[in-house]
Amino acid sequence: MRLVTYTYRGSERAGAVFDDWVVDLRRAGVELLRARGDGTAPVRAAALLPSTVRGLLQLGPDALSLAAEALEHVRASFTREADRFQAEGVLFRLQEVRLRAPVPNPAKIICLGLNYSDHAREAGAPIPEVPELFAKYPNALIGPGEPVVIPRVTDQVDYEAELAVVIGRPGRYIPEAEAYDYVAGYMAFNDISARDFQFRGRQWMPGKVFDGFAPTGPWLVTRDEIPDPHALRISLEVGEERLQDSNTGEMIFKIPQVIAFISQILTLEPGDIIATGTPAGVGFARKPPRFLRPGETVRVLIDRIGTLENPVVREA
């Protein structure tokens, strides 16, 4: 499934995308349960299919399975029921809704630095012996199509294409061999950074946590659709210029290692986001440096996930 958080007429809800359509998962669940003869379908769907993606993940595999069945029911009924589904708010054209960050309210956003050897080299940093971690906060999250705003206090706003892992079940001290059992899915992530703020001191955080500095999306692709997350081409474009181009197989610390390491430190929870680092090609390491400019469009492209696109504007 491709899970989304979407807004329609001011209401924010959990959905799933197929072709050029967005399906409201709770309302699709009502349709599915009614088709099965359940006379309490609206009540049961409200209990079993929360209206947020994080809530859906918190209920675990059974909720995701029901969501997948509800999506398939709508797809199978599409030819004869599309008009009714649209009239009753089960189904929307993709261009009718606004996609938000797929998980807009995670408890944690944990990021890796220097997790591709070529990026470590271009940054003049040694290859790390353990994962280099830092945090972002939900204020930084934006979704596809939302603007990356260059703050008035900096002109060194940089891009970083990353694969993000979304956690699907709680865990502490997770063995590497079981790590994928805790993954709900994957999405594209752009670790926007104000390099002057980042490099003023020894802590990276000041350059990483500006409002809107964590575009994510365009959707959360569930784990069953990406059998090997370390075999994905990952690239970044600004306008027509391709500035990063690599493969997730080049990560120094692979996803099971990262999950095992982080879960030694804290409990991972459903909806937590782990951004797995960026390959070479970032702006500050170029000669001359290449930072984002107002009027440009930045895109992160990842195989089997899609394209996360955001315009760049200057803060008013």
Image (tube, rainbow, N blue to C red):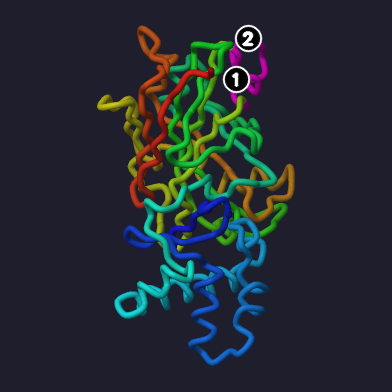
Residue 207, disc:
1
Q: Any magenta on residue 21?
A: no
Q: Is the Cβ of the residue at disc 1 closer than 8 Å to that at disc 2?
A: yes
In the displayed structure, does residue 92 sit left or right of residue 59? left
Q: Is residue 101 above or below residue 114?
A: below
* Amino acid type, mark 1: Gly
Residue 263, disc:
none
Q: Quadrant of the N terminus?
A: bottom left
In the displayed structure, does residue 305 sit left or right of residue 123? left
User: For the image shown, how many numbered marks are present on the structure?
Assistant: 2
Disc with the residue nearer the chain's start (1 vs 2): 2
Q: Looking at the image, which is closer to me, 204 or 308?
A: 308
Q: Any magenta on residue 199?
A: yes
Q: Position of residue 167 (x, y in %)?
A: 60, 53
Task: Say few, some or many: other residues with alpha carbon within 10 Å of mark 2 (under 14 / 14 to 19 / 20 or more).
Answer: few
Most extreme residue toward the bottom is 37
Please give the name of the residue rendered at 41% of the width and 57% of the height, measured from the top-left corner.
Answer: 226
* Amino acid type, mark 2: Arg
Please give the name of the residue rendered at 35% of the width and 32% of the height, measured from the top-left corner.
Answer: 236
Q: Main secondary structure of the magenta part?
A: loop
Q: Position of residue 262 (x, y in %)?
A: 66, 43
Boundaries of the magenta span: 197-209
Task: Kindly identify which residue carries mark 2.
Answer: 200
Q: CA distance from mark 1 to mark 2?
A: 9 Å
Q: Looking at the image, which is closer to me, 151 or 174?
A: 151
* Local secondary structure at mark 2: loop
Q: Quadrant of residue 171?
A: bottom right
Q: Position of residue 59 (x, y in %)?
A: 66, 67
Please give the name of the residue rendered at 41% of the width and 68% of the height, measured from the top-left corner.
Answer: 86
Task: Say few, some or many: other residues with alpha carbon within 10 Å of mark 1 (under 14 / 14 to 19 / 20 or more).
Answer: many
Q: Position of residue 176 (x, y in %)?
A: 59, 53
* Local secondary structure at mark 1: helix
